[in-house]
Image: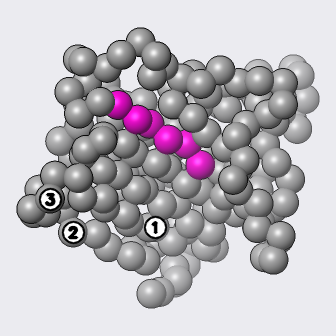
Amino acid sequence: MGYPAQPGTFFLVEGRKPLADEPDSSATASSTMNLRETQPETVVAVRRWASAELTGLPDELLGDILLVVTELVSNAYDHGGGPSQVRLTHSRAPWSVEVAVEDGNTLRPMMGRSRFGAESFRGNGLVLVNELTTTWGVTSHPETGGKTVWARFSRWPDVAEQPETSAAVPYSSGGPVSR
């Protein structure tokens, strides 16, 4: 495990065996990218990494996942003091992808609001996350003073057979799901 030598560089913290090489179709793969001491420009590299990790997905699904990765990592830079890592966990049966971004700030994200003010045209990232994902939430880490914001995409193995009941979970005034 290594840390970036300079801002804007990264090292893969934990690799994964590609799902195509797994004999069990229900195998789960997880990989993590270290983002400590990086700059917001690193989002481009994070998107490339996530795209490579999720090869084989239909373009529409991959685009939605990459948008959520971008939003969560960007939010960590803008509001969380910078992300410490991003983790992708995915499986084929049942099909799911979870994106989790850790940062060192204890403040929970607020959907539809921005600390930059109402006139900044900001604050809609989590609205997109809420609409595109099956569920999302926040896991607090009181022992370290940080949190993980995570989002999960879940589909039936054949996306065409996905029932209507698996649509995105509506956001309630109570906030996102917590773990």
Query: In front of the other: label 1 or label 2?
Result: 2
Which amino acid is tagged 1? Answer: Met
**Residue underneath mark 2:** 17
Q: Considering depth in this image, is 15 or 166 the residue closer to the camera?
A: 166
Residue 154 is inside the magenta segment: yes
Picture quadrant of residue 102: bottom right
* Colour scheme shown: one colour
Q: Considering depth in this image, is 175 or 1 the residue closer to the camera?
A: 175
**Residue under the point 44% across and 67% down:** 32
In the rendered image, the vertical position of residue 55 relative to residue 30, given as above or below = above
Secondary structure found at label 2: loop
Whether residue 43 sits left or right of residue 101 in the image: it is: left
Q: Do callouts 1 and 2 mark residues in contact (Cβ within 8 Å)?
A: no
**Residue under the point 46% across and 16% down:** 165
**Residue under the point 84% across and 60% down:** 106
Secondary structure found at label 1: strand
In the rendered image, the vertical position of residue 165 relative to residue 35, given as above or below = above
Q: Position of residue 72 (x, y in %)?
A: 60, 45
Q: Can you tell which mark lies on residue 67?
A: none
**Residue underneath mark 1:** 33
Category of crowding for the residue at label 1, using alpha-carbon neighbours closer than 10 angstroms: few (below 14), some (14–19), many (at least 20): many
Secondary structure found at label 3: loop
In the rendered image, the vertical position of residue 84 relative to residue 170, given as above or below = below
Q: Position of residue 161 (x, y in %)?
A: 24, 18
**Residue underneath mark 3:** 24
Whichever of callouts 2 and 3 sits on the residue coming sooner in the sequence is 2
| Magenta range | 150-155
Whichever of callouts 3 and 1 sits on the residue coming sooner in the sequence is 3
